[in-house]
Image (tube, rainbow, N blue to C red):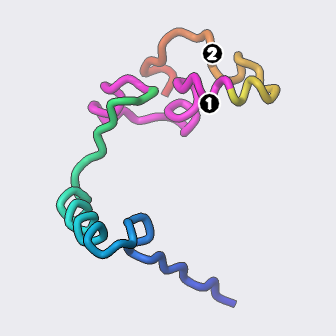
Amino acid sequence: MSTPTLTLFEDRLLPREASALAAAREIYRSTKDLPIISPHGHVPVSWIADDMAFSDPTSLLITPDHYVNRLLHANGVDLEDLGVGRKTMGEEDN
């Protein structure tokens, strides 16, 4: 038995009102291929700018993010297991 293909509605995240939808489509069309630039991040910009390779997702998404660390620690995960308290991540950690 094959798994059905999920087809997402192209405008699913855009406003429904006609004039707003037209403007949103134009903004999306003109920016969709640009890189995401976020002024708020939890990893050093150089990691992304230098296209740094990571040994695992945890090294990029969990260890450097204090919000994720707090949530996991509040739910019983030891800080040591999260890599908290280690020196700044270097090449040997990848």
Amino acid type for the residue under numbered disc 1:
Val
Viewer-nearest residue: 70 or 46: 70
Residue 73 position by quadrant: top right
Helix, strand or loop at label 1? It is helix
Residue toward you, 25 or 16: 16
Amino acid beneath label 2: Val
Residue located 57% across and 22% down the image: 66
Q: Residues within 10 Å of mark 1 (few under 14, many from 20)?
A: some
Q: CA distance from mark 1 to mark 2?
A: 11 Å
Horizontal side of residue 61 vs 83, given as left or right: left
Q: In the figure, 39 relative to 21: above or below?
A: above
Point out residue 86 in the picture as x, y percentages from the top left corner: 58, 11
Q: Is residue 75 magenta?
A: no
The answer to which of 74 and 23 lies nearer the viewer is 23
Judged from the image, the secondary structure of the residue bearing numbered disc 2 is loop
Q: Nearer the viewer, residue 27 or 8?
A: 27
Of labels 1 and 2, the one closer to you = 1
Task: Please indicate whether residue 3 sits to the left or right of residue 6 in the image.
Answer: right
| Residue at the image point whose x is 62% and y is 15% from the top | 84
* Segment tinted magenta in the rendering: 43-70
Image quarter where the N terminus lies is: bottom right
Which residue is at the far left?
A: 30
Q: Are marks 1 and 2 in contact (CB under 8 Å)?
A: no
Residue reaching furthest to the right: 76
- Give percent across and percent down for residue 67: 59, 27
The residue indicated by pointer 2 is: 84
Residue occupied by mark 1: 68
Is 55 part of what is drawn in magenta?
Answer: yes
Q: Residue furthest bottom?
A: 1
Is residue 67 found left or right of 44 in the rendered image? right
Write the residue at 54% across / 79% down. 6
Looking at the image, residue 48 lies above or below residue 11: above
